[in-house]
Amino acid sequence: MGLVIKTKNKYIDLSERGLCIKERPKIPTPKMRMEKINISGRDGTLTIKDSFEDIEIKVELNIMEDDAKKVIRSFKNIIFDTTEISFSDDDKFFYKVKNVEIDDIENEVDFYGTFLVNFVCDPYIYQKDTFEYKTVANNIVIQGYKSMPLIKITPSSTGSLVAFSIDGKQMAINNSTNPIYIDCSLMRVYSDTQSILRNVTGEFFELGTGEHKLNLKTNISKFEIQTREGWL
């Protein structure tokens, strides 16, 4: 099993850089943030669920080549720019990396023959093929736990309002001659790289597991979506 990292929009299999995983790391289950409120006269507490905490994936790496210092120098040049990691035995999914932590590699290698890398990641594991556009016309099916989609709309004409709804929740956008992109994760709406958020009414979409009703109301020639599904 190998570790593949994404850094500066480039995928690198660390086995090709002289590094291999000693053993498959344990992947922790994310913990839910909760607020507990004591209310006088009520048994127990009032519990308000919030969101999930980040997870830490600790990977122990072996150096496979004789020139350990060369491998370490090459590794340090790339590892801190890592934005994604995936494992070769589960390569249809990946983790989004927020931070990378390593100790004194040289001393660890000299003493143990291995060293530890700690990847601080989003709580979700993401399905790769949901980061590709799919054309839909009626229902959107989400298999993961959570979806913050990226939507691409091609208007059918100019000079009129673009409008659609998902599960009855409507968004309307003053028309653009070019495709419109709605990024529900970053809360951005843009066309031709320029923000058009001021022309938008409605809220961004967060979709859960299941089927969601799409209604293309006005002035939409093509509706494409990256569901960008995260699993727990």
Image (tube, helix red, strand yellow):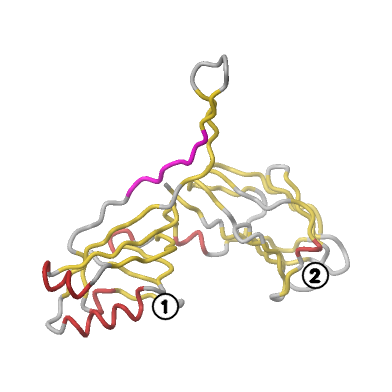
User: Where residue 48 sits in the image (x, y, percent)?
Assistant: 55, 33
Mark 2 is on which residue type?
A: Ser
Task: Assign a secondary structure to mark 1.
Answer: strand
Residue on which disc 1 sits: 10
Q: For residue 10, what is the image quadrant?
A: bottom left
Task: Assign a secondary structure to mark 2.
Answer: loop
Q: In this rendering, is residue 105 above or below 204?
A: below
Residue at 55 percent of width and 16 percent of height: 42
Q: In this rendering, is residue 167 above or below 58?
A: above
Residue at 46 percent of width and 76 percent of height: 9
Q: Nearer the viewer, residue 20 or 37?
A: 37
Left or right side of 42 for 184: right
User: Where residue 27 sits in the image (x, y, percent)?
Assistant: 31, 51
Q: Residues within 10 Å of mark 2 (few under 14, many from 20)?
A: many
Residue at 24 percent of width and 71 percent of height: 104
Q: Are marks 1 and 2 in contact (CB under 8 Å)?
A: no
Residue on which disc 2 sits: 176
Q: Quadrant of the N terminus?
A: bottom left
Q: CA distance from mark 1 to mark 2?
A: 33 Å
Q: Indicate whether residue 190 is drawn in magenta.
A: no
Which mark identifies residue 77?
A: none
Q: In this rendering, is residue 22 above or below 138?
A: below
| Dot in front, 1 or 2 | 1
Left or right side of 11 for 50: right
Residue at 79 percent of width and 52 percent of height: 217
User: Where residue 183 sits in the image (x, y, percent)?
Assistant: 63, 61
Q: Tag 2 or tag 1, which sits nearer the N-term?
A: 1
Residue furthest right in the image: 159
Q: Nearer the viewer, residue 34 or 28?
A: 34
User: Where residue 19 sits in the image (x, y, percent)?
Assistant: 22, 74
Region rendered in magenta: 28-35
Q: Residues within 10 Å of mark 1 (few under 14, many from 20)?
A: few
